[in-house]
Image (cartoon, grey):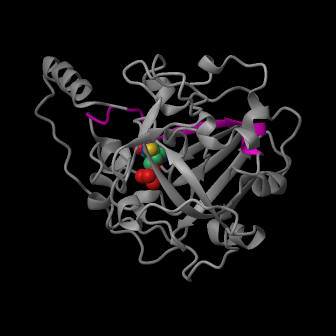
Amino acid sequence: MITPQDLFLQRRKFLALGVGAMVSPLLIDELMAQTPYGKPLDYLKDSNTSLKPTRESDATSYNNFYEFGFGKDDPKAKSGSFHPTSWKIQISGEVQNPMSIELSDLLKSVKLQERIYRMRCVEAWSMIIPWVGFELRELIALVKPNSKAKYVKFTTLYDPNVFPMQKSLFSGIDFPYVEGLRLDEASNPLTLLAVGMYGKPLLPQNGAPIRLVVPWKYGFKYIKSIEKIEFTSTQPLSTWEKQNPREYGFYGNVDPQTPHPRWSQASERVIGERGRKPTLYLNGYEKEVGYLYEGMDRSKLY
Ligand SMILES: Nc1nc2c(c(=O)[nH]1)N[C@H]1C(S)=C(S)[C@@H](COP(=O)(O)O)O[C@H]1N2
Ligand SMILES: [Mo]
């Protein structure tokens, strides 16, 4: 992720170009007034786990969402008027049934369930989140990938009126934010498209109205406010890999034995608790997803 040092260097670069005086105003458009589904979420409870969720107030106030700024408190502070109502998702590429579908219609064809998962950020902190969402494989079954489809590419909405950093010279990363999975990773039952957490629709700072959840990968893979889903034959270039390929790869698998070039990944700071705990390989989901990486070099799955 971008550190104050990176920002300092970047700013110096801009000053050298003579554009340092440009500071973009924080324009956040008043969008719409309610969630796309308008009613409380109706979902199947997760009774399968002993994980104790992080405090909701922590999970909704300590966030990464660079479209709103670099600070952990920017997403909550600066997204107050982002209320996506009619949200369309385009699904295209190597599929038999491409579609452009209203989220509220999509939700009629899937089964909403709660999943309480560990979530580990590449910055070495972690939370436990009770998501509400549906398995991505349900959407995959609806659009029917063809034989050329090998990857799934996700793109966040591009709208500088909603996301102030999308028009900032100091955004640090290229927008719109892009992420990707291999089709077999996307088809694993653990992989969710979440529309809620703590039994409520997602708040803007957490990626309303729909985001990806891949619990065995670092948080940067959990792309927020998804507008486009494309099935591709070649590996998509994700935002952080593009920004700094030495530090962030396509896979982003949680691995205590593969350090980030600037810090260890062996342990993590648990938000809301004192001290640190050891990080688990594949974030504790090796039994469920280890088969996806058999025969691959672990150190290359960063
Ligand atoms: N569009 C978009 N999605 C994003 C990010 C972002 O900056 N933009 N940050 C990622 C990172 S680094 C993390 S750790 C998680 C944070 O999710 P949370 O704020 O809900 O905990 O969102 C991910 N999804
Ligand atoms: Mo992250």
x, y percent for residue 63: 37, 52
Reply above or below: 244 against 195.
above
Q: Is residue 21 left or right of residue 28?
A: left
Reply above or below: 88 against 290.
below
- Residue toward you, 44 or 228: 44
**Which residues, given as a range, are shown in magenta?**
170-187
Q: Residue furthest right?
A: 147
- Asked if one can make out residue 118 in the rendered structure from this viewpoint, the answer is yes
Report which quarter residue 250 is drawn in. top right
Residue at left offset 84%, top offset 32%: 148
Looking at the rendering, in which quadrant would you find the C terminus?
A: top right
x, y percent for residue 272: 36, 56
Q: Is residue 2 left or right of residue 267?
A: left
Residue at left offset 49%, top offset 39%: 220
Q: Residue furthest bottom?
A: 39
- Residue toward you, 106 or 133: 133
Q: Is residue 4 left or right of residue 269?
A: left
Report which quarter residue 133 is drawn in. bottom right
Q: Say if the magenta span includes residue 185.
A: yes
Q: Residue furthest left?
A: 21
Residue at left offset 31%, top offset 66%: 80
- Residue toward you, 224 or 265: 265
Q: Say if the magenta span includes residue 79.
A: no
- Asked if one can make out residue 158 in the rendered structure from this viewpoint, the answer is no
Residue at left offset 18%, top offset 26%: 8
x, y percent for residue 195: 58, 64
- Residue toward you, 191 or 268: 268
